[in-house]
Image (tube, helix red, strand yellow):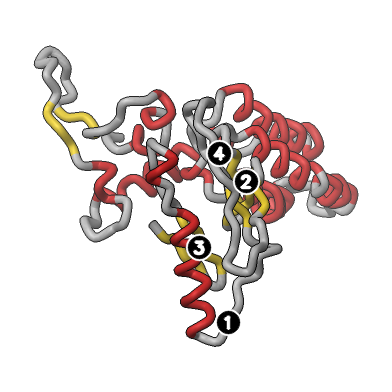
Amino acid sequence: IYFKYADDIQALTFFQDTRDDNLIAELHNVEEWCLCNGMELNANKTKVMNFVTKKSIEISSLITTSGVTIETVNVATILGVAISNDMKWKNHIDGIIKKAGQRLWIIRSLTYVNINNSPNWIWSVYYAVIRSILTYAFPAWCNLPTEQFQRLCAIEKRVERIINSSIEIPLKDYVENCCKRFAKIIKDNPQHPLSEIFLMAPKTNTRSTTTHVPHFAKTTRFKTSFTSFANC
């Protein structure tokens, strides 16, 4: 499976046995395509990440046709979202907390020049320069643990103390609305690439008021993703 955005491309492959690993062949196919189109694959910027559920599996190194070994990493940033090979979001949260914290000085500076003594315009600046960081691509990583989400809320609490005013729409309510809108967009469009996530299968428990459930929602990680907002 290939995912492409502008000049970035990611290749995703699944296998249960190392003998079925065809990622090396796919890498060589990409190199051949680049060669045929007058381009060259930058091996130094190419990374590989392994998501392994069985520790006994040993995955061989990825080597280009020119003999360059592709670096294996534990964390990679894709379109601004830091993805870890353990499928946890701590590294991503650490990054956005650091970036948001570095911008708190803007809010502090504005409180000194608040001529009209009104916090509304300062909140507008907060939405633009800080909350936009805290909520960027949130549906992709909304299944983070509660303690990690509380770290994001702590940033907003600090802003409330700096401005000495309560925010109109708390972070929790805002991101829930984002997930609801995102889920609705996907459900209402059968042509959406993620529409199959919401294919529903009948429930065997007839006592439940919910008659259908997502057909492959078997893990807690999946059930706590943005798909949980499908019936909201």
- SS assignment at label 2: strand
Q: Tell me whether the residue at label 3 lies in contact with that at label 4, contact meaning CB atoms closer than 8 angstroms.
A: no
Gap in Å between the C-alphas at discs 1 and 3? 14 Å
When asked about the image quadrant of residue 203, the answer is top left
Return the residue at label 1. Answer: 39
Q: Give the foreground label among 2 and 1.
A: 1
Q: Which mark is residue 82?
A: 2
Gap in Å between the C-alphas at discs 4 and 1? 48 Å
**What's the amino acid at mark 2?**
Ala
- SS assignment at label 1: loop
**What's the amino acid at mark 1?**
Met
Question: N-terminal of the two: label 1 or label 3?
Answer: 3
Query: Which of these two is toward me, 13 or 98?
Result: 13
Tell me where residue 29 appears, x and y as whole percent. Answer: 45, 69
When asked about the image quadrant of residue 209, the answer is top left
Q: Which mark is residue 27?
A: 3
- SS assignment at label 3: helix
Q: Residue at x 50, y 85 (%)?
A: 37
Gap in Å between the C-alphas at discs 2 and 1? 28 Å
Return the residue at label 4. Answer: 169
Q: Residue at x 72, y 43 (%)?
A: 95
Q: Tell me whether the residue at label 4 lies in contact with that at label 1, contact meaning CB atoms closer than 8 angstroms.
A: no
Give the left or right position of residue 173, taking residue 206 as reference.
Answer: right
